[in-house]
Image: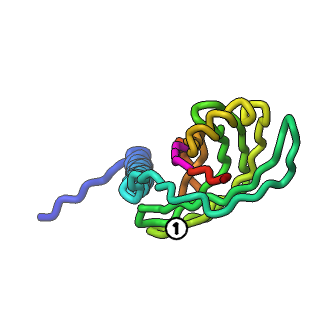
Amino acid sequence: MVKTFIIPRPLFEIYVLSCRFDEISIRSFVMKYIRLSIFILAIWGMAASCEKVKDLQFVRVAGFKVGNLGFSKSIVEMTLSYYNPNSFNLKLKDADFDLFFDDTQVGHSVQDTMIYIPAKDTFYFPVKLEINMENVFKNALGAFMNKEVTIKATGNCKVGKGGVFLPFPIKCETKQPLNFF
């Protein structure tokens, strides 16, 4: 003998509607889970690809040219040579630094151009300095007596890759012999 159940119509409609609601809520839960998983994987991938940036190494002053000479202020153009020890390319922008001769500030530079830095290679950084000649004249006698001057640059710039730029300190120091005679 086969038993048949007769479900009243209103109960059947409630059952069907509740099944549809469960399917919709499960589908939205799965979609949210997939989106969250993709977001977490993207963050993890970006964090794993970011390697700590090693300091750029100052090599030498590659070029020096006096653009505008004056008694109170002069413009000097220099080309600095740096080495990138990192295994990836970088970009440098927004450099802002001060120049010191024997611990006396003599100049200031602001660079707003983007400079491409190749991986594991030497690159050249053009610098246009505004020199305060009063401070240079104050140090001139000491420089003639010592036959060499300590040139130091300190400041900040932004270094990055892939459109993400982080602040990076500029610190370089060199001793330059003065051969006037």
Q: Residue placed at 54% from the left, 46% from the top?
A: 166
Secondary structure of residue under mark 1: strand
Quadrant of the drawing holding the N terminus? bottom left
Left or right: residue 124 compared with residue 134: left
Left or right: residue 173 compared with residue 100: left
Q: Which residue is mark 1?
A: 122
- 175 and 51: which is toward the camera: 175
Q: Residue placed at 40% from the left, 59% from the top?
A: 49
Q: Please count the marks in the image.
A: 1
Q: Residue placed at 67% from the left, 34% from the top?
A: 141
Q: What is the residue that sits farthest to the front in this orientation? A: 181
- 22 and 62: which is toward the camera: 62
Q: Quadrant of residue 64?
A: bottom right
Q: Is residue 64 visible?
A: yes
Q: Position of residue 25 (x, y in %)?
A: 42, 48
Is residue 171 on the magenta stretch?
yes
Relative to 133, residue 178 above or below: below
Q: Residues within 10 Å of mark 1 (few under 14, many from 20)?
A: some
Where are the magenta residues, as a range?
170-176
What secondary structure is the magenta-colored segment mainly? strand
Q: Tag 1: residue type? A: Thr
Is residue 66 on the magenta stretch?
no
Q: Residue placed at 62% from the left, 63% from the top?
A: 62
Q: Is residue 9 visible?
A: no
Colour mapping = rainbow
Q: Quadrant of residue 50?
A: bottom left
- 173 and 113: which is toward the camera: 173
- 116 and 38: which is toward the camera: 116
Relative to 99, residue 86 above or below: below
Q: Position of residue 81 (x, y in %)?
A: 57, 61
Q: Position of residue 16 (x, y in %)?
A: 41, 52
